[in-house]
Image (spheres, coloured by chain):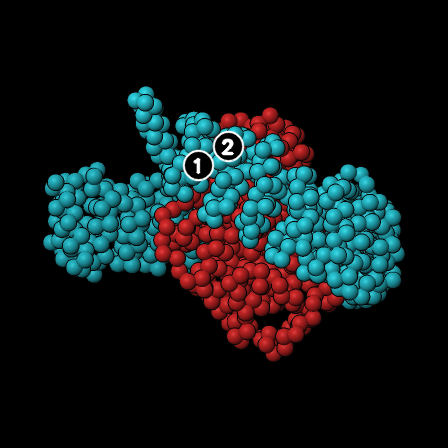
Chain colours: A red, B cyan
């Protein structure tokens, strides 16, 4: 049985066993009438959630969560007032009341005992630090990608989730889409023969950090809390351009920058899955050349990051090649096979547009079962490490070798210094 | 003296250049690799920037460079920035990264000079560097009046995790102020992890136990310590695991479930199986899921027993687990359950059959298919369909003439998923001349499912086209729909012929399908249909399909514009001409301009054509000024909205320059 079928089965399984999870979910003090709608799911069976940093992408994620019958949002935290209020309105509209609490400081939201889980969609600067805070506060975490800024954060995040026993789902929702899962399954199970090359679209590979822009008058803290927005990033004066670009601010950290993280955190993640290498990373990296970057795994498989040369199958494409066949797929939900025979025995639902609904459901099911979602912290750890190692290679512009057991570059002290980055006070991972 | 002044001048000049280079490094989103390699700067020069009166921004960027290039030499200059509120966090970037004792010493020294958040930052850096010599300095901070400082000290001691730090934290677990105790517990957990990593499970377990049993420790830390205490003990941790699984506390039960997945060994599986019998029914599905995640087939007998009887939720959960642990030996049990009365349980069993792994499962299912009856037969047919068992085809060919309509319908669907080219004619015949008219839709769907997956699409299309000639009208429509779903040159040709020469039903269906065609080779066919059919409805439909290809399917802009040029003479309505303008606007190349201008003469389209012409002209003006000047004069002459006319005038003027 494929992983996606297994998850599908689990979805159905949990649908029929919702009641069994009652004991894992904190009883709610909110009256059933306050939950609005038809009350199909009893309050005691609901997962109570908070949203942290709900901007553009977060709004989409929040909507996916609000569609779930067993989810109850009660609070929003954001350093920006306008986004706090917009997200609160979404929640209140869903709940049919005005009760969603808002917080400027995420720590106040995390201090609430009644919240089981949080959605973190702040922007990459805060993802790992907020996830760590949430896990230490006893909350399960759904965190948008890229989840970490560097290799050290990737390792620490996985360790924290293991230590605290919290459920973590990286927002790499393509793991829970049938065509991507099918493509990975063909590769993983040898249907393509011996796998030799896997391709990921990184959506660029430039390493550009956020820098220090000219100082501008700082707005009142209640409108936009600059200190909180900067969070773990090194201090710099207020600048509205930085404030309004949380999507890019400190992506890949302040030292190396975004590199291949934008789509790589999706596409490299799928390649990791296809290569059965969720617990490791490539051991050799070559710097970019003509828009293409190559890395090699210890098992001999080559990872190619390339921006061009894809079939028209939509964004975030991947391609897996073995000595007996290949498959390429992307966000259209369609895939192309080297031979139709590769699909024998399988029915693959075509779901285009990369919805996160299934991924969200996988997370919620695991909140109840205490199992591991498909994009759990261990999986996300090495997907991100691969991207970060590629980013450091591009930054230093020289070939690097990496030891995934020791998690250090071999014979390159400068590269090793770029594995982590000091967090601004008082934050820590 | 003069010599010295010259030297100073040279230094300042190089400093200015250096600052400029560093400033460029951060203001441009440049490839850092290129900057790093193309502008080599010595550490001395970087240090001088830090020591100069340079702007904070420049010093900050210099700190970043020292992360890669700094050594102990840079430490004093960096340490001097630690009390600076703006630059402290920048200085800690290299201070955390530079190897060697100098950075450790500088951070330790800063402990006595800083307070508040800056002190917290320095303590955090000491923790990251795991500086064992800092234990004595950090220990007194556990009672610091500033809670953030005390918390940071506890965590940093835990990160250091040597014997001295462990002793300090263990003592503080009971003696520290209550507000700090959670952080001390966190530090203890880090120490215990390091003990475990070093192979001292007993010491780790002891420390974990102390954390989880000490008063006034936050519940989240107790959960962490409980998990740790189980893992550190290995197999000896089972009683503690069972304690959690039987706990009335939800959180402890939860940590028991996640730890049960983490802990290796057959003893753990056996323990969970035993617990399955003891726990309340509402907890059984969660234990079953934990067993499934462990992947230990030793649990299978217990899972199968749970599937056979008991509360429905537990049975359904167990059936969901069977495919993750089971094999062909489970088929009999699953079939029995699939034939049972409880619909939900039976469905779960059918799904388990469909997902059961193992090389010999398909063969066993086929063997049973020819002997089974009733619900079991239906379950096996559904399994053959979902698993696409080609070996089941002979049995399915028999089943399509079964006395039961349910069996016939299920078998047709299964054949759609399994039949090969050799047996395809059977499905074609079912469509052309079905013995069960009420099941015609099932037959068509089965044929469609089969045809779209045939490896030789063109051969399959030829078979279908050949069958069409002898088929009644309704069957011809069904075959055309199948051809439409398949795609390919033969199918396209058949649809084109049907769209031009077929009866009304065929024209209706084929023109609709052509209008949805996904490959560019349908373009000429659609244009031909648009030109040749007499019925206005099909003419419009074909033309719109043609323009849809020009607009949506991946083509070179030149090709799209060329398609517009061919479409315009065929257009009879403004609606289609508007579509042409949309394509032209999306492809603003030089040949598009005269096409847009040609529509100025139509009063109803004058405004839109003028607007699109201006959009195109703005893009191509540098390439062909003369053409733009002429076109814009025509736009101005035609009139239109004031905004468009103004833009056209400006472009005409620009084109003259």
Left or right of residue A38: residue A233? left
Classify residue B372 by image quadrant.
bottom right
The answer to whether A104 is drawn above or below residue B584 in the figure is below
Q: Are marks 1 and 2 in contact (CB under 8 Å)?
A: yes
Residue B191: percent from left, percent from top = 74, 45
Residue drawn at point x = 56 percent, y = 51 percent? B115
Secondary structure type for disc 2: helix
Along the viewing direction, whichever of B169 and B331 lies nearer the viewer: B169
Residue drawn at point x = 36 percent, y = 48 percent? A214
Q: Is residue B577 visible?
A: yes
Which numbered tag is attached to residue B74? 2
Q: Where is mark 1, residue-wise?
A: B50
Along the viewing direction, whichever of B145 and A167 lies nearer the viewer: B145
User: How many other residues sit within 10 Å of disc 1, few (<14), some (14-19) or many (≥20)?
Assistant: many
* Distance (Cα) linking label 1 and label 2: 9 Å
Residue drawn at point x = 65 percent, y = 51 percent? B141
Badge 1 or badge 2: first in the primary sequence: 1
Number of dots carrying numbers: 2
Q: Chain of mark 2?
A: B
User: How many other residues sit within 10 Å of disc 2, few (<14), some (14-19) or many (≥20)?
Assistant: many
In the picture as drawn, the residue positioned furthest to the top comes out as: B3
Residue A18: percent from left, percent from top = 71, 65
Residue B309: percent from left, percent from top = 85, 63
Left or right of residue A7: residue B64? left
Residue drawn at point x = 52 percent, y = 71 percent? A92
Along the viewing direction, whichever of B32 and B537 lies nearer the viewer: B32
Secondary structure type for disc 1: helix
Residue B479: percent from left, percent from top = 52, 52
Q: Chain of mark 1?
A: B
The answer to whether A80 is drawn above or below residue B193 in the figure is below
Which numbered tag is attached to residue B497? none
């Amino acid at each position: 049985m494929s992983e996606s079928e297994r998850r599908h089965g689990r979805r159905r399984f949990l649908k029929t066993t919702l009641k069994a999870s009652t004991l894992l979910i904190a009883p709610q003090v909110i009256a059933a009438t306050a939950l609005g709608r038809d009350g199909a799911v009893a309050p005691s069976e609901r997962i109570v959630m908070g949203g942290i940093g709900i901007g553009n992408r977060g709004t989409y994620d929040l909507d996916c969560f609000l569609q779930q019958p067993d989810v109850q949002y009660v609070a929003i935290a954001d350093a920006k007032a306008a986004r706090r209020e917009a997200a609160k309105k979404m929640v209140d509209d869903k709940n049919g009341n005005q009760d969603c609490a808002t917080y400027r400081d995420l720590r106040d939201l995390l201090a609430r005992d009644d919240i089981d889980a949080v959605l973190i969609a702040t922007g990459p600067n805060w993802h790992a630090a907020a996830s760590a805070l949430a896990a230490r506060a006893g909350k399960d975490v759904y965190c948008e990608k890229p989840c970490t800024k560097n290799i050290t954060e990737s390792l620490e995040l996985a360790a924290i989730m293991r230590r605290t026993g919290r459920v973590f789902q990286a927002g790499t929702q393509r793991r829970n889409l049938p065509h991507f899962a099918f493509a990975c399954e063909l590769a993983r199970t040898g249907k393509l023969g011996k796998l030799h090359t896997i391709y990921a679209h990184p959506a660029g590979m430039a390493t550009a950090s956020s820098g220090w822009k000219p100082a501008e008058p700082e707005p009142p803290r209640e409108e936009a809390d600059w200190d909180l927005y900067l969070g773990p990033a090194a201090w710099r004066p207020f600048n509205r351009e930085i404030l309004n670009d949380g999507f890019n601010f400190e992506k890949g950290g302040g030292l190396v920058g975004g590199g291949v993280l934008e789509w790589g955190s999706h596409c490299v993640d799928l390649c990791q899955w296809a290569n059965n290498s969720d617990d490791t990373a490539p051991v050799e990296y070559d710097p970019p050349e003509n828009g293409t970057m190559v890395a090699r795994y210890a098992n001999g498989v080559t990872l190619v990051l390339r921006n061009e040369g894809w079939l028209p199958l939509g964004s975030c494409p991947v391609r897996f090649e073995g000595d007996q066949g290949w498959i390429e797929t992307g966000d259209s939900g369609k895939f192309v096979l080297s031979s139709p025979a590769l699909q024998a025995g399988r029915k693959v639902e075509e779901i285009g547009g990369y919805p996160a609904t299934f991924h969200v459901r996988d997370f919620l099911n695991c909140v109840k079962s205490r199992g591991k979602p498909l994009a759990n912290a261990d999986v996300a750890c090495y997907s991100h490490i691969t991207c970060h190692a590629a980013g450091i290679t591009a930054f230093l512009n020289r070939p690097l070798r990496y030891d995934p057991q020791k998690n250090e570059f071999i014979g390159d002290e400068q590269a090793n210094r770029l594995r982590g980055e000091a967090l601004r006070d008082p934050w820590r991972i | 003296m003069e010599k010295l002044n010259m030297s100073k001048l040279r230094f300042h000049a190089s400093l200015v250049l250096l600052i400029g280079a560093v400033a460029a490094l951060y203001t441009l989103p440049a490839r850092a690799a290129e900057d790093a390699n193309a502008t080599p700067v010595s550490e001395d020069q970087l240090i001088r920037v830090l020591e100069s009166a340079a702007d904070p921004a420049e010093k900050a960027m210099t700190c970043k460079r020292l992360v890669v290039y700094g050594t102990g030499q840079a430490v004093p200059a960096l340490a001097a920035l630690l009390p600076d509120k703006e630059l402290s966090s920048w200085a800690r970037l290299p201070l955390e990264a530079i190897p060697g004792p100098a950075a450790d010493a500088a951070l330790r020294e800063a402990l006595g000079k800083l307070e508040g958040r800056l002190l917290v930052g320095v303590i955090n850096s000491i923790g990251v560097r795991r500086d064992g010599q800092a234990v004595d300095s950090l220990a007194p901070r556990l009672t610091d009046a500033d809670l953030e400082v005390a918390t940071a000290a506890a965590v940093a001691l835990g990160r250091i995790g040597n014997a001295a730090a462990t002793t300090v934290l263990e003592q503080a677990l009971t003696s520290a102020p209550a507000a700090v105790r959670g952080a001390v517990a966190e530090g203890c957990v880090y120490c215990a992890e390091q003990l475990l990593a070093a192979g001292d499970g007993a010491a780790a377990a002891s420390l974990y136990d102390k954390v989880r049993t000490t008063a006034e420790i936050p519940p989240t830390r107790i959960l962490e310590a409980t998990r740790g205490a189980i893992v550190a003990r290995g197999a000896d941790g089972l009683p503690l695991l069972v304690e959690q699984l039987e706990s009335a506390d939800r959180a402890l039960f939860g940590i028991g479930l996640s730890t049960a997945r983490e802990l290796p060994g057959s003893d753990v599986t056996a323990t969970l199986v035993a617990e399955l019998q003891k726990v309340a029914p509402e907890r059984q599905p969660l234990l079953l899921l934990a067993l499934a995640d462990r992947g230990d087939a030793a649990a299978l007998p217990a899972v199968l027993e749970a599937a056979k009887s008991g509360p429905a939720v537990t049975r359904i959960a167990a059936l969901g687990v069977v495919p993750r642990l089971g094999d062909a030996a489970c088929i009999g049990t699953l079939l029995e359950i699939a034939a049972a009365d409880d619909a939900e349980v039976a469905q779960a069993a059918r799904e388990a059959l469909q997902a059961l792994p193992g090389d010999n499962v398909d063969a066993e299912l086929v063997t049973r298919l020819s002997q089974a009856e009733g619900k079991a037969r239906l379950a096996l047919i559904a399994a053959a369909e979902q698993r696409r068992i080609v070996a089941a085809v002979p049995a399915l060919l028999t089943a399509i003439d079964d006395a039961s309509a349910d069996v016939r319908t299920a078998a047709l669907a299964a054949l759609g998923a399994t039949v090969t080219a050799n047996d395809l004619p059977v499905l074609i015949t079912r469509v052309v001349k079905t013995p069960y008219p009420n099941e015609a839709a099932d037959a068509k769907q089965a044929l469609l499912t089969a045809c779209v997956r045939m490896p030789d699409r063109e051969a399959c299309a030829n078979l279908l086209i050949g069958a069409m000639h002898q088929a009644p009208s309704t069957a011809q429509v069904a075959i055309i729909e199948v051809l439409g779903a398949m795609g390919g040159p033969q199918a396209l040709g058949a649809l084109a012929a049907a769209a031009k020469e077929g009866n009304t039903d065929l024209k209706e269906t084929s023109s609709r399908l052509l209008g949805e065609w996904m490959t560019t080779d349908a373009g000429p066919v659609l244009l031909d249909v648009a030109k040749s059919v007499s019925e206005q409805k099909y003419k419009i439909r074909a033309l719109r399909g043609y323009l849809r290809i020009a607009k949506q399917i991946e083509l070179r802009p030149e090709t799209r514009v060329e398609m517009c040029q061919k479409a315009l003479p065929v257009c009879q309505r403004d609606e289609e001409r508007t579509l042409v303008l949309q394509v032209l606007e999306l492809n603003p190349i030089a040949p598009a301009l005269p096409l847009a201008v040609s529509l100025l003469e139509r009063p109803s389209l004058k405004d839109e054509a003028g607007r699109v012409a201006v959009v195109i002209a703005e893009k191509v003006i540098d390439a062909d000024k003369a053409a733009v000047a002429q076109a814009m004069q025509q736009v101005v002459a035609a009139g239109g909205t004031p905004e468009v006319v103004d833009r056209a005038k400006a472009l005409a003027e620009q084109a003259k320059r």
